[in-house]
Amino acid sequence: MFGTLLMLPIATKSQIRLNQVGMYPNQEKTAIIEGTAKSVTIKDATTGKKAAVKPRVLRTATSPWSKKLRTVIDFSTLTKPGTYTISSGSETATFTIGDNALRDVTAATLKAFYLIRSGMPIEQRYAGDYARPCGHPDTEVLIHPSAASLGRPAGSKISSPGGWYDAGDYNKYIVNSAFSIGIVLCSYEQNRGYYDGLSVNIPESKNQTADVLDEMMYNLRWMLTMQDPYDGGVYHKLTTPNFEGFVMPTDCKQQRYVVQKSTTATLDFAAVMAQAARIFKGNKDYPTFADEAARAAIAAYGWAERNPRVLYQQRRLTDPAVSTGEYGDFNVTDEWYWAATELYLLTGDQQFADVIAKNQPKRFSAPTWGNVAALGTYDLLMQDKSLPSPLGERLRVGELCSGMGPGVRLLSYCDSLIATTKASSFQTPCGNSPRDFGWGCLAETFGANGLTLCIANRLTGDAKYLAAAQQNADYVLGRNATGYCYITGFGTKSPMHPHHRISEADGIDAPFPGLVAGGPNPGQQDIAEVKTYPSKQPDESYIDVMQSYASNEIAINWNASILALLGWIEAAQH
């Protein structure tokens, strides 16, 4: 992939909103037309002939906050693969139908992780025009005073190479890395056959391991270097004191540090290492990793038991002060739950089952870096048949409807999402409340909830959940209030100026393909830099300019959530 520069999307102002990337023959197909549609026509884009389908008006819908009127058009009976146009009045939009509708965009969201690797040259044979020299080797990182221990005093040097740049900046964060890998591995473990066949042309592609696992391994190896070997605790992040400017990695000059160990980072580390140890067990390309990761997970969990509430508070860091991304979190219940879940699945040890029971959430909520409980619930439910008794018996699918346990809470949550679709302006189970929009909403609302709906479909076999997950994907891919496909390099209108240092500084007009924008954010925390947004409406509060870190930044957790969703949807079609 990406041997040559991708064609730039052509920005349009079409009043027809629909998935701009691709639809499957048998999925629900919906277009949204701004205003009232008097007539709608679908034609074969090649021949110009009318398609043998009569588009159906499902309803007109009024936005609950902007009061804009929209017409919801259904054309699900069109199942023949091909490229088509849909027209209403003077407006026309193009769409495609195919068996592998989301394969390319899924591959791109995975390949983006290679493009943001730290500590190695990004080569032309893998990256095409996006090749660049090695930046941030991180072989001489200083121990910040907040991270000092008897074995590693302040100012001593460690080597912590590799990993991914976290977001628009050049730092590396354990909390977000663990979440990102955890959600991707969940999707992988339930769809191994699909991911094993998804090759994206990275340096490891010729080995026997799926590219998605190779890519996760690149960051897992870095994470292992962030554990203090003297006590098992894990540093919260590897960072410069301040954010670098919008320059290339090789032009960065600030000293880099590992800073304070935290309970949240250490438990997240323990969780994802235990999860990875289970998945990589017996892997021929990484034969020692599973044992190494298991030992690291247990050591980290032990440190957390001895330090159950060491919270990361950046304002207290001095010599030097640190002002980069905080990933602060004052509730560790969800981290205990996820870590205990993964260690229980790995070891079967009753002590972890007891911690699961003690910290099990009373209600389900979609996973985010700051609330990782759902990652534990996902794996408990999907792995239930392999769980030792008695915990496994309490989680059997047959008991999900008994009113007890995490399964029924997840299904009830999904049903509540789907219930909002019937009045939705965009025929989606998410995006129907102002609360659905904010920092990273495309991943944390649409992506994470979409993945939850996929889990519900797998648990129950009920097709309504997969259909709802596809509706969320359609929103991200263009069927939304702004008309953007929010993944760079795809669709007829996608972000060209994300808040991403390399994409801004590399001299190439197009940003890295496959990056997921944060999305509409009515908080507009960057208004001082952006100056003005096109709208204050919750679902339209997005602007494609580099300065907009509140709506247009990219981040590994956002890419991971959308990759997990799109990969699952793709796998479900085959």
Image (cartoon, helix red, strand yellow):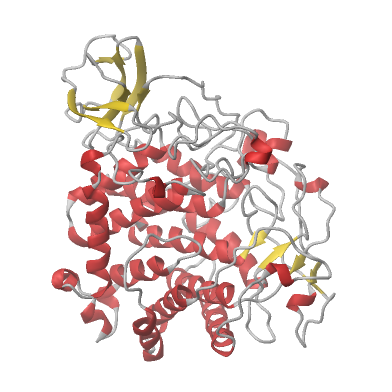
Where residue 187 sits: x, y (%)? 38, 58
Q: Is residue 288 visible?
A: no
Q: Quadrant of residue 539?
A: top left
Where residue 381 sits: x, y (%)? 29, 70
Q: Is residue 475 visible?
A: yes
Where residue 160 sits: x, y (%)? 72, 67
Q: Quadrant of residue 354?
A: bottom left
Name which residue lies at 50% across and 50% down. 558
Where residue 26 sits: x, y (%)? 21, 36
Is residue 532 placed above or below 236 in the rendered structure? above
Name which residue lies at 29% across and 54% down. 454
Name which residue lies at 60% across and 29% down. 5
Is residue 570 placed above or below 557 in the rendered structure? above
Front-lying residue, 133 or 529: 529
Front-lying residue, 114 or 230: 230
**In the image, 527: left or right of 21?**
right
Q: Quadrant of residue 256?
A: bottom right
Front-lying residue, 28 or 91: 91
**Quadrant of the image containing the N terminus:** top right
Is residue 555 placed above or below 387 in the rendered structure? above
Report how many numbered discs are placed on residues in the image.
Answer: 0
